[in-house]
Image: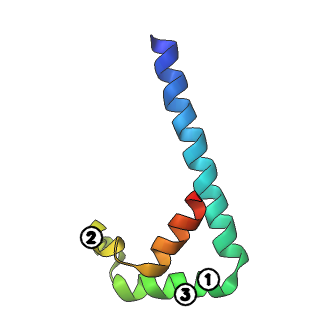
Amino acid sequence: MFADAVNVTGAGTETTGATKERAMYEVLSHPAVYAALAEELRTAFPNPGGMRLPVLEKLPILTGVIKEALR
């Protein structure tokens, strides 16, 4: 049972990490996308400690980056 739990946890971690890594690579490889995403985040959250999920969910560029990474 322990081995199965480790396999399930590891499998989920590996694929999620690879997806996030690829998304970051693609954003950083396209300066216009990076600049637009950074500006959108700075505008929405002038104080990074104040990030809230409902606001994040409404950001169109961030949503596009996430959807494209998952595609």
Calculate the distance from the C-alpha at mark 3 to the C-alpha at mark 1: 5 Å
- Residue 5 vertical position relative to residue 40 in the rendered view, above or below: above
- Residue 65 vertical position relative to residue 30 in the rendered view, above or below: above
Name the secondary structure under disc 1: helix
- Residue 69 location, quadrant: bottom right
Left or right: residue 8 versus residue 56 is right
Question: Which residue carries the number 3 mark?
Answer: 36
Image quadrant in which the C terminus is located: bottom right
Calculate the distance from the C-alpha at mark 1 to the C-alpha at mark 2: 22 Å
Amino acid type for the residue under numbered disc 1: Val
Q: Is residue 46 visible?
A: no
Q: Residue at x 55, y 23 (%)?
A: 7
Name the secondary structure under disc 3: helix
Name the residue at the front extreme: 71
Name the residue at the top extreme: 1
Going from N to C along the chain, the mark reached first, 3 or 2, is 3
Q: Are marks 3 and 2 in contact (CB under 8 Å)?
A: no
Amino acid type for the residue under numbered disc 2: Pro
Name the secondary structure under disc 2: helix
* Label ID, residue 33: 1
- Residue 53 vertical position relative to residue 59 in the rendered view, above or below: above
Going from N to C along the chain, the mark reached first, 1 or 2, is 1
Q: Are marks 3 and 1 in contact (CB under 8 Å)?
A: yes
Image quadrant in which the N terminus is located: top left
Q: Residue at x 60, y 81 (%)?
A: 34
